[in-house]
Amino acid sequence: MVDPTDPGSDLPPTGRSLFDRIVTEEEGGKRRYAVPFPFTALVQKIERQVDANPGASPLKRVLIPLNRSLQRNAAAPGFFKYPRAVLGVDTEAPMQVGTAGLFLKDRLFLGYQEKVGIIEVISYNEAAGRFEFQVVRDYRPGGNPRVVYANRLLCTVCHQNQGPIFSRPLWDETHANPKIAALLQAEGRAFYDFPVQIGVDMPNALDEATDRANELSSSQFLWQEGCEQAGSPNLSIDCRADLVRFLLQYRLTGSRGFDIRSPRYTERFFPAFTKQWKERWPGGVLVPDPDIMNRNGLDFFRFTGPKGAGQMQTVAAADGRSRATMRSLFEPSIPRGPVASLSGGPEAAHRVVAGLSQFLAEVDIQRLDAHLFGLPSPRHRHEAVCRYELRQRGGVIERLIFQCHPPNLVDPDTAGGFSMDGVVYLQSGKIETGTIDHLSFGDGDEMTDLEVVPGEATMDRRGLNGRFGLVQEGSHLHARRPDGNAVTEMTFRVDLPGAAGAVSQETSLPGTATVSVADDFSAVHRAIDAMAEENRVGASDFLAHKPFRRAGVMPKLFEKMGMSTLIWCCLEDQNMPVAVPEVHSRKEDSIDPSDGERHPAIKTFYRYCADCHHGEDQFPPNFLHGSPDQVEDNLTHCAERIFFRLGMWQIPSSERPETPMPPMGTLRRRHLSPEEWPDHAELGILKKYAADALQSSNVRLPQLNDFIEKGYDTLRDCLPPSNRSGRNAAEWAGDRPHAVD
């Protein structure tokens, strides 16, 4: 569903990221970037956008001192003084008057590394239907924060799902690990107001948010491709129109289901969707995996300074060799298999409906539910016969337990029978509370976990009569059947024997009940039919072969239904500041493959390594950045590590202490397989260049086993001290940097 070898353009093809919407301010009719500093101020600004309930933070925050990001070694050796701060939004904003609000849940993730003044940002772009990768640079005291769109080729080496990733349980590299939390606490820092003592619920919530975020791209794929029928634009539009109907039913029913018995589904949508699936994906489609392996960074380090000082070096392995700080097994750049393989049929249809329903905010559904319930719609009655158990105190009925089932003979004026189990509580002649465990209609529709809306109860000579409404537990949306139609009210009668006061001797009494259902979802059908017609004549494109856009579909739906006009975000990009790309291919300082005065291997290095090692950033080492002379200097200085990483291709994958380079994703983009690459001529060219550079310095022919014995993290650093910025020159003096770099 997402091709890791095709990350797309660095800049948004249309629209802008949600992060841009948050950190820009209007000035003179135009918007400009104004990223709050310090990081606590930025966090507070994001929190204000969501405005969660008191006592519940809309952000989930973790600290990862020994992390696996591009800045994994940036804080060395003070990992616990400058941990990576990661946050994500997993909460929706409450209802706001006149505006639909920013929809940030599962769509905004930040990673902050204070030591180098960098924030990495992954946030959703609704107009383009994808996550954008951005970097905030120079984010430091006295700095001038600069927002750029990142090199997606580099990002998707690890973010192969083109979205956020997170580790699996038990999240041992986060400060949910008590040992890591204790080491952080020993530093005596506030850490951007992130709580230092947390349980696994915090990283678990982040993990779940990234999992849900992963579904967005899958749902967009099925929305666009699952409905697209070549040469039949009207059928494609009808398919997407039906998907909108079903996802609205799904959300209005509290994600309990949608109308799979309607002719729209059985005779139109499902046959077309299934036919498309069989023709295009007979073997199924693969769902990308957002999870990387759990890792405890403390397994690879030992302290060399006072307790809590954060001075660390690598742990020696059992055989005495220096063990790598990032075993190949845990490297996020290793290609991940799919998290699932999805075949066609009802499962796929349900998945696309459930997935697309997550593009709508709770407030959208609340507004729609309230509007529908207020419409003058035809009502249909359903009836049941019941047994009631009454509990009294002081001659006053306090509780009513009932079990109902369809009558033997259904009144022809009703729509059918139903069965039900539930209880209501009465006070002062009023129905105060209650629950309905299940409500099943004669046609098979079933509703569960309903709450009673306060109602009336009266006593007469024949018995006890009452009426009340029903809402869904938790969401308090009106109780709705899978077809989207609302249960408007329930009425009941308990037959009393003789005078009203004679009920004290009875524990079980007969009676009846009726349920009224409004045909209010018909208004949605009419609105969607009108939207489909607009798409057919080209007056709209929200049902076309484009991403599903909440800010396009819902305003149009609300308009067709005569609902109030709202301010919607986020499709338009007028007045936004110019989107700036990461500088990673400047012509004036790039390697020119046609430069005959340079070693011919330089062209090969540029071909296989420039995607990741040619940017401004020194993480990963940008040894291909700079003038041709600088690049040759860098390659010579980096020869030990290059020789080591290239040599990993000759070692079985289960035995590699480090991941091989170039990464498998780079090979796949060049239509090379991991099986053919170890013997490929161009790998030989790269290895020979590195070996020659080493031999010229050390005289004898370098041997891979010698470097493995020494350990990768003890090898000479990739960049000469003169090419290091942001650190004290003395810190990089000599050939051996900090052991963890």
Image (cartoon, rainbow, N blue to C red):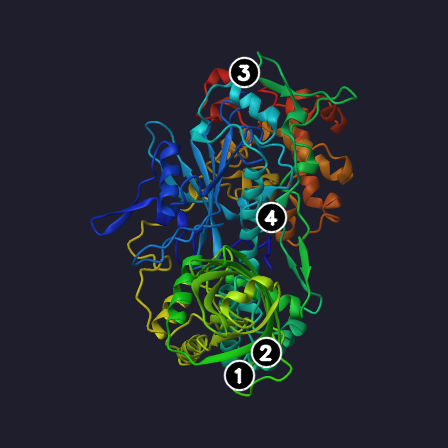
Mark 4 highlights which residue?
290
* Spot occupied by residue 89 in the image (x, y as percentages of width and height): 46, 45
706 sits to left or right of 139: right
Which quadrant of the rendered structure holds the C terminus?
top right
- Total number of numbered labels? 4
Mark 3 highlights which residue?
309
* Spot occupied by residue 303 in the image (x, y as percentages of width and height): 62, 16
Q: Secondary structure at mark 1?
A: loop
Can the viewer see residue 437? no
Question: Which mark is first along the chain, 3 or 4?
Answer: 4
C-alpha separation, residue under disc 4 versus residue under disc 3: 34 Å
Would you say the residues marked 2 and 1 are in contact, meaning their CB atoms lie under 8 Å apart?
yes
C-alpha separation, residue under disc 4 versus residue under disc 2: 47 Å
- The structure residue drawn at horizontal position 74% and vertical position 29%, both measured from the top left corner, is 704
Q: Nearer the viewer, residue 437 or 121?
A: 437
Mark 1 highlights which residue?
414
Q: Tell me the tag on residue 417.
A: 2
Q: Secondary structure at mark 2?
A: strand
